[in-house]
Amino acid sequence: MNINPLKGVHDLINDEAFDWDSIIEMMKKVFNAFGYSYIQVPTIEMASLYARKGDSSDVVRKEMYQFLDKGNRLISLRPEFTAGIIRAIISNKLYINDQPLKYFYYGPCFRYERPQAGRYREFNQIGVEFIDEPSIYNDVEVIRLAYILPLAFHLKVKIKLNYLPSRASREYYIKELKEYFKGHLDKMCSDCHDRYERNALRILDCKVPTCQEIVKDAPKISNYLSIDEQKDFLFAQELLKELNVNFVIDENLVRGLDYYSGLVFEVVLDDNEGEDLGAIGGGGHYDQLIAELGGPSSLEGVGFSYGLERFVSLARRYAFSHPDYHPNRPLLVYAPLCEEAVHEVFDLSMKTRNKYLFRSVQFYHPVSIKSALKFANKVYAPFIILIGEDELKDRVVTFKNLLTGHQEQINLDDYLDVINNAVADGLMEAEKEGKVHLRKEVR
Ligand code: HAM
C-alpha cells in the first residue's frame, strides 16, 4: 500500500504549526484594525468561475486541479481566493447593504506546479479584498496594509509596483510588443513562444536571462498610460512615500492572473537572501472582474494575498530563530517611578495599544529604576519608558534603549506620534552597533 505524501504537499508539526497560528492571529489583528471582516469560501467551485473566457494565465490554463463530479460538473479546487470571494459577494448580494466591502481570508489553494523551494501544489494564502467604487486611496491603503504585515515580524520588504493600462490601451501595447518580439523569437525560450501567442505581456516577466536581455529594449508600458492613468500612478507614489512605504517601480511586473488593471504590486524581501522563495505576496486592482461575474459594474476591487508557507518560513528564519527568542517577550516596559506617574503610564500604554500592536508590559505601582531595569533585563525587553517626578514636571518621558544604552526624552504630548519610529530607529541603531541582528530581533 502506498501512503506516501503526494508531491508538493507538506505537514505542519509542533513549533512550525504553533508559529503558523501565531502569525495568522497577529495578521487578523491588523486586518481588524483596517476594517476587514472575516470570510470563508468553499475550496471547490465550478471550474468556469476561474476559467473565464479568454483567460491566458498559467494558473488557470495549466495549473488548475479539475475533476468531473458524480453529477458530471466540471469542478476546480481553488487556485486562488479572489474569484471565489467575488462570487460569494455576488451570490449573497452582499453589495446591496454593505459598501465598501472589506474581507480577509485564509486557507489552502491548489496549483499543479513543479514543486521547488517555497512552491507547493497545496499551499495556503492569507489576504484581503476591498470592493468599492474605484479610488486610488483604496489601492494605496491596501498596499500599505500589505507592507506593514511583514514589518510586524521584522521582515524588511520592498514593494515592486507597476501600473497596467486599461484594456483598450493594453491591447494596443500588446500589439506593439508582439511587433517587437517577432524579430527575436528565435532566441527566446519555448515558454515565451507560447506567451507570444497567448498574451505577450507575460514575456516581460520571463526569468530566462536571454529573454530578459531582449525584454530590456522592448516598448515600455508607461508610455501607454493615458494622462489620467499617469496622474493616478504618480499620486499613488506620492501617497506611498508619505506613508514611508519602501517601493520600486518595476515596469515588467505584469502579475500572473488576468483580471488586473491599474496598480499592481508584489512584495519581496529587501535584499537577496529570500530570493530563492520568490515573491512573498502580490496583488493589485481589478476593474472588471465583479461585472464579469454578474455584479454591479460600478464596483471594482483591490486586494493581495501572501503565500503563508513563504511568509512563515521567512519569519521563522529571521524573526523566530534568535536564541533569545521568547514568544512572550515585550518590546516595551513602562515604569512609573513615583505614585503620580502611575496614571500617566496607564494612559500612555492604553492609548499606544489602540494605535500600535507591539507588546508592552507595565507596572501600575511605583518602582525603583533598579528593579524596573532588572525586570526589563529578565524578560529581554529592548526598551524601557521611565516616568518620574522630573519627567512629570517637564511633561516628557525617558525612553531608554537597553541594547545600546542610549536614552532620550520624548515629549508627552508627542508620544503617540513618535514612539513607533523611536522603537524602529532604536532597533536599527542597535543593529548598526552590532548589539543585535535586527532581522533576528523578536516581534
Ligand atoms: P498570486 O501572486 O498568484 O496572487 O499569489 C499570491 C502569493 O501566493 C504569491 O506571492 C506566493 O507567495 C503564493 N503562492 C502562489 N503560488 C504558490 C505555490 N505554488 N506555492 C506556495 N506559494 C504560492 C493571487 O493569488 C491573487 N489572488 C492575489 C490577489 C488578491 N490579487 C488581488 N487580490
Image: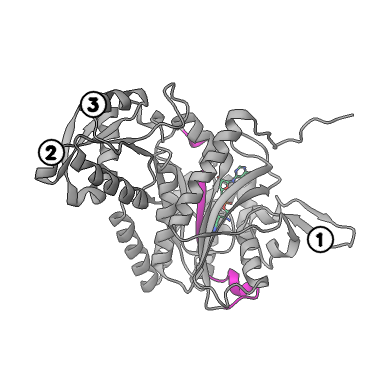
Query: Residue flagged by tag 1: what amino acid is it?
Result: Leu
Residue type highlighted by circle 3: Thr
Question: For this view, does 247 lie left or right of residue 295?
Answer: left
Camera-side residue of 249 and 288: 288
Classify 10 Å Cα crowding around label 3: few (below 14), some (14-19), many (20 and above): some
Which image quadrant for residue 37?
bottom right
Left or right: 370 as drawn, with respect to 330: left
Stretch of the chain drawn in magenta? 274-296
Give x and y (percent) for residue 139: 43, 63
Q: Which residue is mark 1?
A: 74
Q: Earlier in the sequence, mark 1 or mark 3?
A: 1
**Crowdedness of circle 2 by 10 Å Cα count: few (<14), some, many (20+)?**
some
| Residue type of the residue flagged with mark 2 | Glu
Say which quadrant the N terminus sits in.
Answer: top right
Q: Is residue 117 above or below residue 142?
A: above
- In primary-sequence order, the first of circles 2 and 3 is 2
In 3D space, how far apart are the residues under numbered discs 1 and 3 (Cα atoms)?
62 Å
Magenta run includes residue 293: yes
- Gap in angstroms between the C-alphas marked 2 and 1: 73 Å
